[in-house]
Structure formats: C-alpha cells, structure tokens
Amino acid sequence: MEIRLDNVSKSHDRPVLKELNYRFESGMLYVIKGVSGCGKSTLLNIIGGVEKEYEGSVIYEPQKLRSAYIFQRSLLLSTLTVKENLQLIRGDIRAVEAQAEILGINKLLEKLPGTISGGERQRAAIERALLREPQLLLTDEPTASLDDENSQKIAEIIAGLKGPDRILIVATHEGYFDAYADEIIELDYGVIKTDNKSPSSGCLQQIPLPDSAEGSGSATGSGSAAGGRLGGLTYVLKRQPGLLKPVKLLLTAIFFLIILLGSALQKNVTAEAIRLYKKDKPVDLIRLYGDAVKGLDEETKRFLTFYDYYYAEDGDVTAYYLLPKEYSVLGVPGAIAYGRFPEKETEVLVDSALAEALSNDREHPEQCLNHFFSFCGLDLTVSGIVSNEGFRGDFRRDWYYAYGKDDKPLSAENQYLFLSYSLLQTVGTKKESNLNVIMASCPGIWEDEALQDHLKYNENDSLNDYLQHIRQLRAQTEYYIHVAFIVLLALFAIACLYTVSVIRLELFYRRQELGYLQIFGLSKGRIRRLILLEYVVKLAASLLLALLVYVLLAGIYALIFHGSFPLPDVAQAGSMIAVLAFMYLAAVWLTAAVFLRRSIVQLIT
C-alpha cells in the first residue's frame, strides 16, 4: 500500500506547493515539518483527497484508501455528548465503548465536549478517526493547542497508531513526533528541502482496534449493535436546540391554520347554517309538486308527512292550519306579537283583528290572552297574537304559508285564527290549491342530498327556501375558499423563496461544520438528509402548533355558539398541507444540494 506524489503543484495568489515528488508507504510514520504557511495543510488536503484542484497527480495503491483526519482542534460538536459525536461517525456502540476504554476516555462518553479538557477532547478526536478504520491517517498540528504534558501524551498515542496496514502522516511545526518518525520531511514554502530517514525508537505500544470493530469491512458500519448510529432526530434536536421555538414556527403554522380553518368552514358551513336555522325556522318543511308526489315509491313516502290545505269558518272568523312549532313559520321569532306559541292542541294563535274583537279593547288586544272562546263547537284558548308586522314580513310571503284566497297572503284586516292541523282536520274542509303543491315534513332532509334530488320536480325546483339559501351559501363558500387556497399557494411560494435565502444564510454560517463532517466520513447525501430532517421537524412542529390553535379556536366556537366541534375535511386539508410541505421541503432539498456542491476546501476555509 503506497501513495505517490508526481509533480504536485498548488497555487493560490502565490505558489504554495512546487512540483513535489514523494512516496509514502504503509507501516511508516511520516512527519512533515515546517513553519506556519509553508504548505503543510495544503499538502495533507491533497493527499487526503480534500483538495481537488492542483497540478500533477496523486497515485494510490490500492486506488481507494479509507482516510481519517485529526486536527489541531477536536472539532467535536458542542451540543452532542462525546458518545453522540462518535456515534454520528459509526453506529457500533460496542466498538465506540471498547475504543474509548483503550484510549482512557470511557468515563467521558456521556459528557459534553465543553466540560472536558483539551487533551481529553483530542483523545476523543483520535477515537473518531480510528472508528473509520483508516488506511490513511492524516494529522494536522494535533498538539498545537495543548500544553507540553498533553502534547507529549497525544504524540505518543498518535505514534502508537502506526501499523503495517496504515500510512500515518503528521504535519507539525513542533518536535514532539521527531523521536517516533520513520521519515521527517522538511517543507520550505512548497519545496521539500530535506528528507531525513530516521528509524523510529520502536518502543511504542501499538494501539489496537477493539475486537468488535475488527473485520467489519466498512469504515462507517451499519451499526446493528445495541445503541446503533446516532439517530438523525437526536442529532437535529441537540444540534439545533432552538429549532422548535414558536417564533420560528409561526409563519408556517399560520399557513397550516388557514388551511384547517378554510377546510372546516367549507365542510361545516351547511351543517352549521342548518343548525342555526333549526333553532327558530321550519327547516324540515318542504313543498312538493303533486305530479312529483305521484311518482314517489312507498319507501320514500315513509320519510314524509303530508299536510293538506284545511280551513274552517265560523261566522266572521276563519281558521287555518297550524303545524307543530318545528314546522311552522309562526314559531319564528317576531311572528308572535304577544303571548307564546301554542303548547296544547286546544290553544290557538289569533290575528290582531280577532284579538281586538275578543278583548273589546283596541288599545290593549293582549287582554284576550288565555281567553276562552268557542269555534265550530271547539273550546279554545288564546295563547298568542300574531304580529301585524309579521304579516307584512318576508316570512309571510313564503308561498307555502299563503293561507288566503287564491293562495295569497292573509290580510291583517280580517279575523283569523290558527288551529292545530290535527284538530282542524276534524272540523275543517280541505281546500284545493291552484298551485298543484303539497306541503310535507321530512326530518333530516337537509343532511340527505340524495333524497333532496329524488324529491325535486326538476333541477330548478327548490324544496325549501332555506335550503336554497344554504346551497347558495355553500356554493359561494366553496368558491371563495378555493380562491383563498389558490392565493395561499401563491403566498406560500413567495414564502418559500424567502425560506431559500434564510436556508442559504444558515448553511453559510454552518459551512465549516458541514465540510468537516464530510472529512470525518459523513457523505453529502447523509448531510443533505440531516439538513432536510431539520425542516421536516420544523414543519411537523408547525403543524402541531396549528392543530393546537385550531382545537382552541374550535373549542371556543363550540362553547360560544353551543355547536358541535367543527372538523376540517381531512382529505382536502391533508392534500393542501401535503402540497405546501412538498414545496417547502423541495426548496430545502434543492438549496442544500446546491450549497453542498461546493468543495470541502471551500466549506472549511
């Protein structure tokens, strides 16, 4: 196993390396010495494959060598424990613990890098390199930031890493490795001045790989052992402790909340309008054309209760039918000026003209309330007086309450009373309607659109004026919700463009970390996945925040309006959220992919 430099040159604004020719062999410890800025780090980067742009060639035998780095600084991620830093590189926890035992840092694995000494951090960095099972081990000024005692210890440990199947190269301007070097290369501003071949002392004990790591066949083993590779979620949450701050989730959460509210509005507008109508309006009373009724099957008819036009006359007083309150327009607030809607069969409503006649007081007709009188042999009680305003209001113009002659609204100048339908049937006469229309009640007709369509005489027929209003409301709501969702998508696309610039800025500040992670063995693909996972977590947290706010708002609505808990259309809301999530994550993925096209040298410098 060897590495050959063949006329290797490198320049920046000036020549850094000048036509270097050298051969590195396995089983040897090479020490490259020279002052700062003489090209030592550049040469290591070229040998390690980090630097790609240079002249000449580097020949490897075999062609692919697993390499690992040890730097002046440990470069451990400060928010991860020592063990987590190591598990990020290799998932075999037994190998991690066994190697830590050999290097004497097994008691430090659960500690954060900031709580241990510089020498201990450097030992952890050495283990991180060894977990790659490197055939080429490159160390760049590994003792420069340590005191003399620790420098001696680290130099001894690194020198002990020399092995028959490994090329070990140390770049340093200090003399701690001189006694252990097989060859010392003096580099003088890009030129090898001297090549000192100095047999090593041979007194070092070689640091072995732990049994659990030997023969794994991969520098980044899959980590099937207990513990496994550091999970991406653990990395994301620990590496970005402020990731889930509400202020960072707010913008996306607002978009999700709008989708949930819009979908809930579209899904529940009909049911909620019906619920509000049902409080005081005869929503289950419908009108049917006689011709349509003749064609109904018995199964459909059993859902219906039909009401014929009965009336009765006694002197100057005419009685018309009064349906149960849930089917009667006279039960609508404002329809009764005095009193209440009848609760008993023998209780009736009277108009103002009849009330004045019964009370003999034009100024105070309400004195007739609870007054007993006889009509067609029936003993009746006045429970309420119909409002004159009500006769002129829209509800009296609803055609299926056209009690008067020729199906016209009643006149407030005549005397009328409204008697329960069942009682009127016993004393009244059935009137034929010129409109060929039959009244019917059909509980639940609002919730059954198939039945609605079945009962219609034609597609333009409106079974119920309230139902017509509801359908118009639903159509308008759907239209505006769809427009709102289109606008929302456009706004989110703009937000994604803003997100791209934010991601670029975040990655720029993390560029060295991303570069060194590649040096330590993480592939670009895995780094992209970790970056993507950060934003997946943010999206999930934003959605959760939106759901919590939605539940709170829905609960307040249900409490105030005494309605049911409004739920969104899961399919609609889910598809919209999925589209937004795809747009967002696609922007993240593409931005990260473009950013990581930069070379490692561009990232770490």
Image: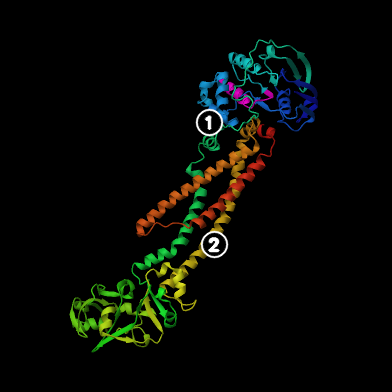
Residue 167 visible at all? no
Residue 527: % across, % down: 62, 37
Q: Amino acid at mark 1?
A: Gly
Q: Residues within 10 Å of mark 1 (few under 14, many from 20)?
A: few
Badge 1 marks a residue whose secondary structure is loop
Image quarter where the N terminus lies is top right
Q: Which mark is residue 275?
A: none
Per the image, the residue denoted by label 1 is: 227
Residue 330 visible at all? yes
Residue 154: % across, % down: 61, 17
Task: Return the disc, 2 or 1, that comes first in the chain's sequence.
Answer: 1
Quadrant of the rendered image containing residue 235: top right
State the residue lying farthest toward the bottom: 315
195 vs 578: above or below: above
Q: Residues within 10 Å of mark 2 (few under 14, many from 20)?
A: few
Nearest to the observer: residue 388 or residue 155: 155
Nearest to the observer: residue 428 or residue 137: 428
Label 2 vs label 1: CA separation?
A: 51 Å
Question: Which color scheme did the rendering employ for the protein?
Answer: rainbow
Residues drawn in magenta: 120-138
Residue 360: % across, % down: 18, 83
In the image: residue 514, left or right of residue 388:
right
Per the image, the residue denoted by label 2 is: 483
Taking the magenta stretch, the answer to whether it contains residue 195 is no
Quadrant of the rendered image containing residue 104: top right
Image quarter where the C terminus lies is top right
Taking the magenta stretch, the answer to whether it contains residue 125 is yes
Q: Amino acid at mark 2?
A: Val
Nearest to the observer: residue 254 or residue 156: 156
